[in-house]
Image (cartoon, rainbow, N blue to C red):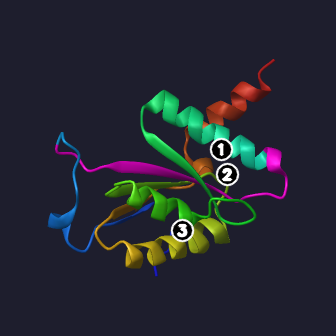
Amino acid sequence: MSTVGASGSGIHIEPNDAESVSVASNGEPVTVVILIAHGSRASASNDNHRDLAMALAERSGLDVRPAFLELAEPSIPAAIDEAVADGATSLRVVPHFLGPGRHTTTDIPAAIDEATLRHPDVAFTVTAHLGSHPAIIDVVLDLIAP
């Protein structure tokens, strides 16, 4: 099983057969970003996460899809399976969590380990959790500025 250290460093898992990875017409792998949140009983919180994924997709031009660890849909496995069914050959998984903890160091890596068994020809990269990025300090400073 893969684990991610408390420092938030990411992991990268290459496909079993790198030569079998599908590519787009421009020769590049078909990459989908899976943005993972915890999930909530409050539908507004889940909608906010979905809206963030949509805004990231619009601004970046990337295919960004929301997923939830629990309490909301789509689940992580469902989002991954749908992306692969849609032709993804490379997945970048971004934990939308502010701090390290069991979900970012154990649960999400375990879900990705399971996904690699279902999709051995897909490359998976799990980034560090959102809160570990140095720019988070600038975001907080912006929020508290007079």
Residue 41 located within the stretch drawn in magenta: yes
> Among all residues in the image, which is located at the extreme front?
85
Question: In this rendering, does residue 112 appear at all?
Answer: yes
Q: In the image, what residue occupies the spot 18% across and 39% down? A: 26
Q: Nearer the viewer, residue 137 or 26?
A: 26
Q: Could you say whether the residue bearing mark 2 is in a helix, strand or loop?
A: loop
Q: What segment carries the magenta color?
A: 27-44
Q: Is there CB contact under 8 Å for labels 1 and 3?
A: no
- Left or right, residue 13 beside residue 129: left
Name the kind of residue labelled 3 in the image: Pro
Query: What count of labels does the image hold?
Result: 3
- Read off the residue under disc 2: 98
Distance from disc 1 to disc 2, alpha carbons, whole Å, reads 17 Å
- The residue labelled by disc 3 is 77
> What's the residue at 35%, 55% (across, down)?
88
Asked if the stretch drawn in magenta spans residue 92, the answer is no
Tell me which amino acid carries mark 2.
Answer: Leu
Q: Quarter of the image holding residue 38?
A: bottom right
Mark 1 neighbour density, 10 Å: few (under 14) some (14–19) many (20 or more): many
Q: Residues within 10 Å of mark 2 (few under 14, many from 20)?
A: few
In the rendering, at what x and y percent does residue 37 appear? 66, 55
